[in-house]
Image (tube, helix red, strand yellow):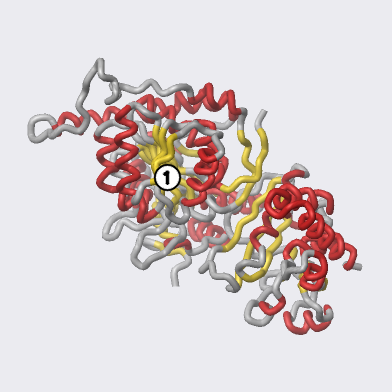
Amino acid sequence: MAKIKALTGAEASAEAMRQINPDVCAAFPITPQTPVMQKFAEFVADGIVKSEFICVESEHSAMSACVGSSAAGARTMTATSSAGLALMWEILGIASGLRLPIVMTIVNRALSAPINIHCDHSDSMGARDQGWVQIYSENAQESYENTLLAVRLAEKVLLPVMVCQDGFITSHGVENVAVYDDNKVKSFVGELKPYKPLLNVDDPVTYGPLQLTDYYFETKRQQEPAMEEAKKAYQAIGKELKKITGNDYGYFEEYQLKDAKAAIVVLNSTAGTTKAVIDKLRQKGKKVGLLKIKLFRPFPYEEVGRALKNISSIAVLDRSESFGANAPVFGEIKNALYDAKSKAKLHSCIFGLGGRNIYEKDIEDLFSKLLTNKLKGKEYIGVR
Amino acid sequence: MLPTICFVKEIFEIRIHGRGGQGAKTAAQFIAEAALDQGKRIQAFPEYGPERSGAPVVSFVRISDKQIKSYAPVVNPDVVMVIDPTLIGPVDVAEGLAKDGILIVNTSETAEKIKNKTKFNGKVCIVDATKIAMGSVGKNLPNTPMLGALVKITGVVGLESVNNKVKEKFLDKIGEEKTNRTIEGIKKAYDSIQ
C-alpha cells in the first residue's frame, strides 16, 4: 500500500534515495538542491540507509568521486543545480564516456550572470549533449518515481541519468506524494550487478585510458546505440514500475491532445499549470491540448512527430535560451515535425528565465493567440 | 467539511503575508498538512525572495478534493492572512482577494480601521495573535494563534488536526510544556473569534 505523505519535491527525491539505498553518495550543497542532500544526509546520519556519504569540496570533486565509486562497482548517486552542474561539466562527459550508471537529481536553476537562484532550465539544457539520459518531472510525485526508474535504466544500458525537477516550484513546494511500499520498491530496484568493476582483481580492467585517433571514435560511436537502447529500456522498465505505481511512463504525456486544434509543448511544472488552463478552456469548448516531454535524452522524435502531426497550431515553451539558435525543446519539436511532414504553424516561446513567474493567465492568452493565429515569430512570455 | 466559499472555486486558496522569521511558511505547511491528514489534496509553497529576517514574505496554500494541477502562484485567494500588521500599507495585502473572500489580520486595532487601511470592503476578521502568543508562549510568535483564527473562521480543517500537527512538529523540538502552551494559544485565538 502506498503511504500518502506531505513532501516537497526535494524530499520526494531523497525518499527515493532512501529506498534505493545507494552504496555511495558524493555531493556538494547548492541552492535549491540543498534540501535533497540535507534530507538524505539525515537518513545517513540516522542509520536509515547504509550509504557512504562523501562530503566533497566542490561539484567537480563530487562528480569525480562518483566516477571513481561507480567504476569501482558501487551504486552511486548525487544531486546538484545550476553552477554546480556547470562545474561538473568536464566530468559529466567522463561519466557517460566511461559508461558509468550514475544517477543524479537536477534541481533546475538559472545560470549566472546575472546571479540568480531561481528556476529555469539553462543548467540541464546546457548539458543535454553530454551523453546523459535526461528525464524531466512535472511534480514531486514524478521526481520520486522517475528516480526509481532512473536507477534501473542507468544500470541496464550503462549510461548516467539526470532526473530533473523545477527549482523551488517543485523542490520547495509541499504536496501529496504517494510513497510506495519499501519492500516492493527495493525488489523493483534490485541489486547492482556491476559490469567489469575496477575492484574485481580477478578480472583486471583499465578505466579511462588515452584513446587518440586509434579508438576514441569507436568508443564514442558506441554511446549512440546505448542511447537507442535506453529508449527501449525506459519503456520496458516503466512497465515494470507501473505494476507498483499504476502510473504510465511514456516518453511524453498527451493531455487532451487527440482532437486539439492548438497545443502547447512544455516540460516540468509548467505542464501542470497548462493542464489546469486546458481544463478551464475545454469547459468553454476550446479544443486545446498539451504534450509534456518526459524523456528528453534520448529524444523520441518519431513518437512526438506522430502525436503532433495533425495539430495545426503549436507553441513550444522553453525555460532556457540557446542564444543565436532555436531554443532546446523548440529545436527538437521542429525536427520531429519535419520528419513527420507536418504543416503545423510552430511557434517558439521563451518564458520563466531566472524564475519569472508564469501565470495561468499567460497560458490562457497564449492558447487564445494560437487559436486565432495571432502569434508572430518568437514570443517572450512575461518579459518587460 | 470544507467551508462554503471553497465550492465556488473547487480549490480553496490561502495567501499568507508575514515577515521573514515569523513562520508564514510554517503556517502554510501546518494548514496544508492538517488538510492532507483529512484526505485532501494539498499544496503549500512560499514565494522565495531575498530570504532576510524581517523582509516581507508570502506563502500560499491550496486545498482541494481533486488533484491540484496548477503550479502557478495563487492570484485570487479565498482567504488572506496577515501575520504582521505593519505590512499593511507597504504591501497591498488585499490584492486579488475576492469580494466574498476573507481578510484575517493579526492586530489590536478594530476591523473598521483595517478596512480603511486596506480598502478591502469584504469580510475582515481581527485577532490579536501577538498578544495571545505573548500570553501563551511568552514570545512574539503569532503564526500559530493565527491558525486558530483561520480554523474558526473558515472551518477549512478541524482545530484538532491543527493541534495534532503542532504536536507532531514541535514536541521533539521544544518539549511538552512549550508545545502545550502553543496549543493553548491556538485555542485562545480560536475562542476570540466571535
* Residue at image point 46% right, 34% down: A51
Chain under disc 1? A
Disc 1 marks which amino acid? Ala
* Residue at image point 58% right, 73% down: B55
Viewer-side residue, A243 vs B55: B55
The residue labelled by disc 1 is A79
Q: Position of residue A143 (x, y in %)?
A: 51, 41
Q: Is residue A30 left or right of residue B66?
A: left
Considering only vertical position in the picture, is A143 above or below B50? Answer: above
* Residue at image point 28% right, 36% down: A96
Viewer-side residue, B151 vs B98: B151
Viewer-side residue, B34 vs A279: B34
Q: Quadrant of residue A233?
A: top left
Hey, which residue is sitting farthest right in the picture? B194
Q: Position of residue A380 (x, y in %)?
A: 42, 64
Considering only vertical position in the picture, is A84 above or below A243? Answer: below
Q: Quadrant of residue A227?
A: top left
Hey, which residue is sitting farthest top in the picture? A202
**Residue at disc 1, secondary structure:** strand
Q: Is residue A331 visible?
A: yes
* Residue at image point 37% right, 35% down: A102
Tell me how many marks there are.
1
Considering only vertical position in the picture, is B79 above or below A228? Answer: below
Q: Position of residue A40 (x, y in %)?
A: 51, 42
Q: Is residue B192 left or right of residue B162?
A: right
* Local crowd size for mark 1, using a 10 Å CA cut-off: few (<14), some (14–19), many (≥20): many
